[in-house]
Structure formats: C-alpha cells, structure tokens
Image: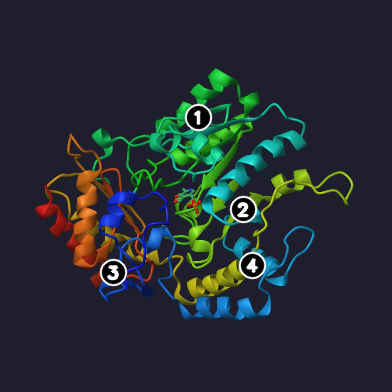
Amino acid sequence: MQPQLDAYWMPFTANRQFKKAPRLLARAEGMYFWTPEGRQVLDGVAGLWCVNAGHARPKIVQAIQQQAGELDYAPPFQMGHPKAFELAERLVQLTPPGLNKVFYTNSGSESVETALKMAIAYHRVRGEGQRTRLIGRERAYHGVNFGGISVGGMVANRKMFGSLLSGVDHLRHTHDPTRNAFSRGQPAYGAELADDLERLVALHDASTIAAVIVEPVAGSTGVLIPPQGYLQRLREICDKHGILLIFDEVITGFGRTGQPFAAQTFGVTPDLMTVAKGITNGCVPMGAVFVKQEIHDAFMQGPEHLIEFFHGYTYSAHPLACAAALGTLDTYAEEGLLTRAGELESYFADAVHSLRGLPHVIDVRNIGLVGGIELAPRPEEPAKRAFDVFLDCWEQGVLIRTTGDTIALSPPLIIDRAQIDQIVQAVATALRRVR
Ligand SMILES: Cc1ncc(COP(=O)(O)O)c(C=O)c1O
C-alpha cells in the first residue's frame, strides 16, 4: 500500500517533484536495495557515503538488537557506559599517530560544530583568546549547522540563512578543469593554491586565526580531489603560523580512499578530524571528532571537579550507536574493508574513465572508491541533465547520486568488479540517451 506522502517535509529534496513520482526503498541487504514493489536496485553510493560495509551486515544487526535489550540509553554527562570507552580505544588504533582522543557526536554536522568550537576554545585555554577566526574553503560542504555553513562554500546552503558566523574567511577551491580534466587520482596541478592561506594570513594576521577546515576530498560539491602536494603545503603553512588544521573526513573516513582515513592516504595528519557516516556503517546516527593529545591536554587544567569543555549532546555515545560502531569495526577488520578501496582503485578508475568521450562528459575524477563524472550543464537548467541521468539509472536499477551537474559514485566497499561494471554501464546508457 502506498503511504500518505503529505506530512513529511523531506530534506535536500525537491518535495513537489518527488511526491508526484516517489522513489521508495523498503529493504536492503549487501549491495542492494529493494523497492516496496520488490524491484532490486544496486547501491552505487553506499546509501549516502555511509554504508561502507554494505547493508544489513549480521554482526552490526546483532549488536544493535542485543544492545537495545541490554542498555537502551545511558546519560553521557557525568556518567558513562563501557562500550563508549571500548569503542574509543578501538577507534584510536585506526587514526593517524597523535589523534588519540575521541569526542562523540551524532552526525557530521555536529562533528564539524564540535571541532570548530574545540579549536577556538583551545586557543583560549592556552591564553591566545584572540585567535577566533575560522577559515573554510570555497565549494566546501561541512554539514548544515551555522558553523558548518559559515565555513562551507556552497552558495545554495548559505544564501538563505542571514549573516552566518562572523569572522570567517575562505580559501580558493582547488577545482581547475582547464589544467586537470580527466586526471586519474590526484591532479598534477594546484599545490600552490594552498598559498591562498598566506594571503588570508596577510589580510587578517595569523594571531587572529584559530583553524582552517577542509575536506581532504570534497564530495558533496562534486568530487574534488586534492592536487598533489596541496594538503602538505596547507599543513606547512598552518604549522608556520600556529593555526590548527581540521580535516573533515565525514565521507572519506572508514576506508573510502583506500586507507582508514584520507589523512593516511595523502600522508598529512591534521590536528582535529571529524567523522560520521561510516563509523556505524550508517545504521545508527553517530559522529566523532578525533583530537590530538596536546589539544585535549590543554583543556585538562584547573580544579578537577570542574567540567573542562562545556559541550556535548544528549545522545553523545548513545549505547545503540556504540554497539553498532563496534559491530562495524569488527566487520571492517574481518573483511579487510578499510584497505579494499585501494585494491579496487585501478579497476574502478578504468571503469569510470571509460565514460570519457560519451555525450556531455567534460571531466572524470577518481580516488579510492570515489568517482566523479562532470557533465556540461544545459544552459537553461543547470543540474537537470545530471538529475535526468540519475532518474534513468534508477529506472535501470542502479542508485547513483548527483550534485549540480556532477555524478558522484561511492559504492559500498564490498562491491565486486561485475557490480562496478553494472553501475558504469547504467551511467553510460543514460548518458547516451539524455538530452
Ligand atoms: C564533508 C562532510 N561534512 C559534513 C557532512 C554532514 O554530515 P551530516 O549530514 O551527518 O550532518 C557531510 C555530509 O555529507 C559531509 O560530506
């Protein structure tokens, strides 16, 4: 029976269009969804960059079921439960050296707000309270809360919401198709774009800047891969000026680029790192901020009975989320999923780059198990051509995602070669017939 669609105001959705022709998902397992009518749909996007181990994985399902009956909720303020601590110990075995403290949140957006607040407060507790400025980047996506949209760089997410946070500036983005179109992996040109931070330092003075936040690979703004040397240079400039570097790894975390974190793939360690999505395989909302020991330690002063960081959420370290995350980490470890994107990268790259030359394709980008296929927009209706490709693929039984006129592919890390071919074939078929 078709549900009533009226009351639900859907997020980031063209509500009126959707409700005329709804696309509903009723069940999922492994690499597939099924619609209420029983039509099978191959998941080319890991749900929304989160179901890295595939759907309905037994260890994760069991962990959640068992936890719900054992401890449904525990207050996280001035109280704890064992799995929250166990999970943190497990997580920091995966992070780059030094990032060995974990603060829990419930989403990527909350992780970003938490990291930004930590950065500003860190400078204050060390006596540099004038370092309040936050630097983001054009075309960045850091979730939808006020801090995140302020440092973010997507105009549609910003323009409706007033004056945002004050004291924010932006680096130039790194997308440069004239020099880098159809790069395999990291583009060759653009390391010097990191020097834009020196421009902002010259404008504002380093003593006013708390942190720079970037996505190592920007996903929501169209799959932008960092040019070779860019992140290294950003790290050097931050170090030179005492500015904290935050990596937003909400989509790159947990194996997407071939290592547990993109920081490891690119060999650059940030001071704070935000994650969500793949931490629980998308099963239960959860996010986290990984923090360098010395940043954490700077807060651990004053009388011991006083709260050191006035921040947290009712659902921080929710028992169901912790159980799901532990089951997820077990699944990742048992199946070698956190490095599997690296093993499949070359095959995946060949597949997505085979779309070069098809109608409307103006760029193809890839890293790990992430692919971006950029289409020339129809002049009169930007983003519509890519959305038509999305609808065609859906009809063909393949779920892809589009952002603007870029198709983004980010399949579960359990994908096999035949399924990669199926996704790319569906896109190719759609491209041949889209207007
Ligand atoms: C880089 C990045 N940061 C933050 C977010 C926001 O995460 P959430 O939707 O869980 O709040 C996303 C979501 O896609 C993201 O890609």
- Find the distance from the CA under tag 1 to the CA under tag 2: 31 Å
Establish whether ligand 1 lies closer than 8 Å to the Cβ of label 2.
Answer: no
- Label 3's element? strand
- Find the distance from the CA under tag 3 to the CA under tag 4: 31 Å
Residue occupied by mark 3:
42
Reading the chain from its start, which is encountered first: label 3 or label 4?
Answer: 3
User: Which tag is nearer the camera, tag 3 or tag 1?
Assistant: 1
Kind of residue at disc 1: Gly
- Find the distance from the CA under tag 4 to the CA under tag 1: 39 Å
Disc number for residue 87: 4
Q: Is residue 195 at all visible to an observer of this figure?
A: yes
Is there a contact, CB below 8 Å, between mark 4 and mark 2? Answer: no
Kind of residue at disc 2: Phe
Image quarter where the N terminus lies is bottom left
- Label 1's element? loop
Kind of residue at disc 4: Leu
Disc number for residue 162: 1
Reading the chain from its start, which is encountered first: label 1 or label 2?
Answer: 1
Reading the chain from its start, which is encountered first: label 2 or label 3?
Answer: 3
- Find the distance from the CA under tag 3 to the CA under tag 1: 40 Å
- Find the distance from the CA under tag 2 to the CA under tag 3: 33 Å
Kind of residue at disc 3: Leu
